[in-house]
Amino acid sequence: MSKSGAMDLASNLGGKIDKSDVLTAVEKYEQYHVFHGGEEEDRKANYTDMVNKYYDLATSFYEYGWGESFHFAHRWNGESLRESIKRHEHFLALQLGVKPGQKVLDVGCGIGGPLREIARFSNSSVTGINNNEYQITRGKELNRLAGVDKTCNFVKADFMKMPFPENTFDAVYAIEATCHAPDAYGCYKEIYRVLKPGQCFAAYEWCMTDAFDPDNAQHQKIKAEIEIGDGLPDIRLTSKCLEALKQAGFEVIWEKDLAKDSPVPWYLPLDKNHFSLSSFRLTAVGRFITKNMVKILEYIRLAPKGSQRVSDFLEKAAEGLVDGGRREIFTPMYFFLARKPE
């Protein structure tokens, strides 16, 4: 299990970026986004650079706040955040019908929290594809500590151009990851290619819902906050994801925005009006402490220059996510289960 503390946050901030270059990387990353004059087409054209910079800069914050699984979850009353995250991952494996010994692909695997959980839950072999070198290095170490390094592995590659033969995997899943793709159709088509005929692809997608009004300035502000705070070139409508799946050749078995019937709002851990000891670092008080801790660590040069700027855009993301969730214009869990025909 990851046990990231303050010094881990400071020493790992910036990932594979040289510590002296972190501020420059922050400035270049910010320039991709609306608040700094960036354009959607530039973000899509340069998505590899943008997303890599984002995860080099943000991964240590994610691990410090969330643990090893960087995603939200449908949550029952009385269920802890950690419990809901594990159940969210188990649900995915059950929907895919993953069996012992099968080869599974995790598209956009982060540092491998879901990969390890699903591998242990289903006794399967999971490969994670990720284009960020720092996250893969971290994930390999966590695999070793968890004892799954013999059955699970990581491949550094762009999931828009995967280095696998056709019909390789028995199941494919993505958890809040393919939202980074510049083109949903291209991404899903590549997943279709590497999946065996008759097998399934399941995902949780970050999407704007039908309640999103592109002519509403407040809605656009929320969307832009989420994009800069989460390394996204754009946020697609749920209907666009569904359309892209079908165009890629998939048969959609079922799809639903799971946020709609979650008894506990998915955004509650980030809500400033919510307090929880079990997920303290995510609360408003916890984030305030983290922000000031990072400020001090940067001042005394234990954290690289630019660290506070990263903390600031992640806080902007938290505000956008909560506002988007409350207004029901954004969901991080548009779920679908799709099948590649025989």
Image: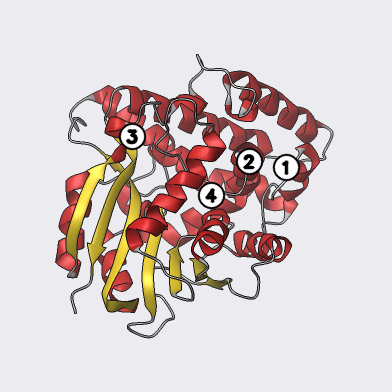
At label 1, which amino acid type do we have? Answer: Leu
Foreground residue among 230 and 45: 230
Badge 3 crowding class, 10 Å Cα cut-off, few under 14, some 14 to 19, many 20 or more, is many
Q: Are marks 1 and 2 in contact (CB under 8 Å)?
A: yes
Q: Which residue is mark 1?
A: 9
Q: Which residue is mark 2?
A: 61
At label 3, which amino acid type do we have? Answer: Lys
Query: Residue drawn at (66%, 27%), measured in percent from left and top?
Result: 291
Helix, strand or loop at mark 3: helix
Between the residue at mark 1 and the residue at mark 4, the CA separation in whole angstroms equals 15 Å
Q: Which residue is mark 4?
A: 54
Residue 104: quarter of image:
bottom left
Which label is found at residue 223? 3
Nearer-N-terminus badge (3/4): 4
89 w.r.t. 252: above or below: above
Foreground residue among 66 and 159: 66
- Residue 20 falls left or right of residue 284: right
Helix, strand or loop at mark 2: helix
Query: Residue placed farthest to the bottom in the image?
Result: 165
Between the residue at mark 1 and the residue at mark 2, the CA separation in whole angstroms equals 6 Å
- Residue 293 falls left or right of residue 249: right
Query: Residue drawn at (48%, 21%), measured in percent from left and top?
Result: 271
